[in-house]
Image: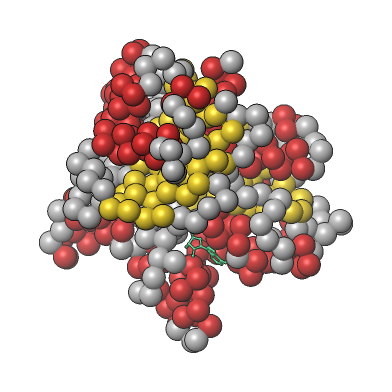
Amino acid sequence: MYTLVINCGSSSLKFQLIHTESEEVMAIGLCERIGIEGSKVTYQRKGEEKSVTEASMPTHKEAVKIMQKLLTDEQSGMIKTLNEVRAVGHRVAHGGEIFTSSALITEETLKAIEECCALAPLHNPASLTGIRACKELMPETPMVAVFDTAFHQTMPEMSYLYGIPYEYYEKYKVRRYGFHGTSHSYVSMRAANYLNRNYEGMKIVVCHLGNGSSISAVQNGKSVDTSMGFTPLEGLLMGTRSGDIDPGAMQFLMMKEDLTIAEMLDVLNRKSGVLGVSGVSSDFRDIMKAAEEGNHRAQTALDSFTYRVVKYIGAYAAAMGGIDAIVFTAGVGENDESMRKKICNQLAFLGIAVNEEANSKRGSEQLISTADSKVAVLVIPTNEELAIARETISIVQ
Ligand code: AMP
């Protein structure tokens, strides 16, 4: 049997067909520009070349139909009918305070996800459309919602409350939620497993460093703090997102540049971060290249990024009263050995030492600290789809 993992963005639908027992990825697809001109589908069957085709997809419903066709097609498919799919796992961005774990999708679950739409107005409606379209095609197949926020629901009040009038939390649920939960949970658990240690007895800092980046403090198997907040804008400098900024600076800029709230938020979400500082790109590889060629702003962007990562790790070490392990994951965390080395060197005061040879390896789970390092440092490739598939199967079973 197979597990189908679906991740709907506001204008995209990603899917993976995973063999339930072997956990092999059988097929992978991406429907892009849904509802926008020029929509296209990228599809790759296990062991074959990628294909890219244009297809009309006015809504997510058409995208789901295309996914079905690709997966069951005589030529391109991996299965004869969708009946071979044991369960579907849907990634859902925001579960608010309602969902502290993944949930079997029922009418009640859908209503509750709808209630969370106000907290993620771009993402949750897209997930709901995707779920409904799938349910129409596969009414008998059990489906599970896996939330980006759920893992962080264990944070104590002192971590998740903002220092604003408490009534705003009571009335509107304005608080820190945190995101990338599936990744933080998966890699922290894998790290404990790799080290052969009891997950429930460890203090771990997870650095999910990609285009979107967040750090979390995982104590005794539970998230106790994380850098993203009410939205995924808070915390680290990211590809295009500013991370932490004084709200007073926003008011100042809005007046100076005559910006609306929406325009200001667009600047903070799409034109800031390492792109904004460097003026080069949001892609770390481009920025590194420019820095090597002597571009000062590119170097500053990298330094600011590294500095903030180090600051958060230090803060979380203090918050947990020490750390047993630091885990690097996602595009930058998994691939950029020089960034990892710089971060770890700045943390030498914690007794952290990096094994250069191990740090230069790529593509697999690695312990990159030396045998006498006081803190274990690991690279654990994240695999959100696999984590969602496992979660889905454990819930439907
Ligand atoms: P993600 O959002 O997790 O897919 O990560 C995307 C980011 O990872 C992009 O900014 C890439 O530039 C970065 N990345 C991927 N490979 C490398 C690499 N070898 N060195 C540095 N950054 C990388």
Q: Residue at x 74, y 54 (%)?
A: 366
The residue lying toward the viewer, choosing from 233 and 346, is: 233
Q: Residue at x 55, y 47 (%)?
A: 46
Q: Going by the image, does 243 lie left or right of 367?
A: left
Q: Where residue 44 appears, x then y in whole percent?
A: 47, 49
Q: Residue at x 64, y 63 (%)?
A: 340
The residue lying toward the viewer, choosing from 390 and 86, is: 86
Colour logic: secondary structure
Q: Where residue 118 appears, x then y in whole percent?
A: 27, 31
The residue lying toward the viewer, choosing from 32 and 69, is: 69
Outermost residue toward the right in this view: 372
Q: Going by the image, does 287 lie left or right of 19?
A: left
Q: Residue at x 48, y 44 (%)?
A: 28
Q: Going by the image, does 119 lie left or right of 293?
A: left
Outermost residue toward the front in this view: 74
Q: Where residue 350 appears, x then y in whole percent?
A: 74, 56
Q: Where residue 387 appears, x then y in whole percent?
A: 57, 35
Quarter containing the C terminus: top right
Look at the image and tell me whether residue 145 can be seen: no
